[in-house]
Image: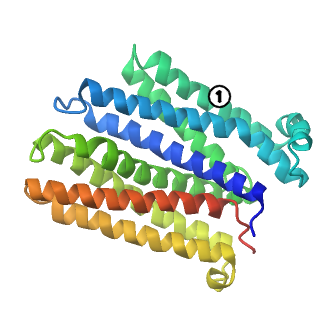
Amino acid sequence: MASPFFILTVLAAVLWDSSYALIVGTVLAGSWLKGTPELPGQRRGSAIGRFQATCLAVLVLCHLVRPWLVASSMSGSTQFGQALALVPTVLSATRQGGLWYANSLALAALVAAQFLIKPRAASLALWIAIAALGVLAATRAASSHASEEGDFSFAEISQFLHLLATSVWAGGILVSAFLVVPHWPSAESASLWNYAHRLSQTVTWALAILILSGIYVAWRDLHGTVSSLWTHPWGKILLAKGSLVALAALLGSLTRFRCVRCPPTSERAAAMGRLLRSEAVVMATILCLSGVLANTDPGR
């Protein structure tokens, strides 16, 4: 039976991964919608902005809790007070502490871009947000199993690309499926299909990077022992995640070849919406499994 501390650690990881992916998705959606007169409009644009701010608040909350979780993990203590007393040591004398400070700067830049710079200079805010999101992904990779080979190793770079590709795919699909496509005024609008083309192209590239980096990361963590896929909990979780990735890729292919690449009609728009929502549910499950996977020992 999983301990309460493990459940809390996994929950924090899932919330962080999901919030990060959704922020990436809102940034992408905002870029694809730029110059589109029909959508989002003032109301829809405000809704996306509020959603992005909510995800950012969750990201900050997970960031503030992380030093306590790291202290508990390093000390083996699940007592709140004991772990809290070790937080200053973790922040000042460990590698995780240095990464936490880098995360703090990136989150501060992201908050500034969202609330201070964006109302005055949207383009500048976008580039600051992209840079901050890149730093957050890099520090996340540096905190993973890949960090065992040292800073800026091939394993760590592969994990960084894997995290970014997953966030682009999951975030783009989730935001598009629930915040953008269902609210388009006209199902046969050329701008809707232009948006769908951009989404499909971006997700295709993200999927290619995700698969290539994922294969290497999995092979490294398995240490070349394929039998661990069905004999160890980490391997079983990885198999489940891989199966869901294949399902999501299938749904994305149906969206691309049966809807996006065909002449726009109301029926195809409705089918595209259903496929996107189905893919979004699968991607949300993948994000949850990723949180469990990141906090499970590969057992090499």
Q: Position of residue 289 (x, y in %)?
A: 57, 63
Left or right of 111, for residue 99? right
Residue at figure coordinates x 11%, y 60% from the top left:
262
Q: Viewer-proximal residue, 117 or 173?
A: 173
Q: Viewer-proximal residue, 282 or 157?
A: 282
Note whether 300 is above or below 85 in the view shown: below
Q: Position of residue 97 (x, y in %)?
A: 79, 39
Q: Position of residue 75 (x, y in %)?
A: 90, 51
Note whether 207 is above or below 222 in the view shown: above
Left or right of 9, for residue 185? left
Q: Is residue 222 visible?
A: no
Residue at the limit of the structure toward the top, as seen here: 120
Q: Quadrant of the C terminus?
A: bottom right
- Secondary structure of the residue carrying tag 1 is helix
Which quadrant holds residue 281?
Answer: bottom left
Note whether 44 is above or below 95 in the view shown: above
Residue at figure coordinates x 42%, y 20% from the top left:
118
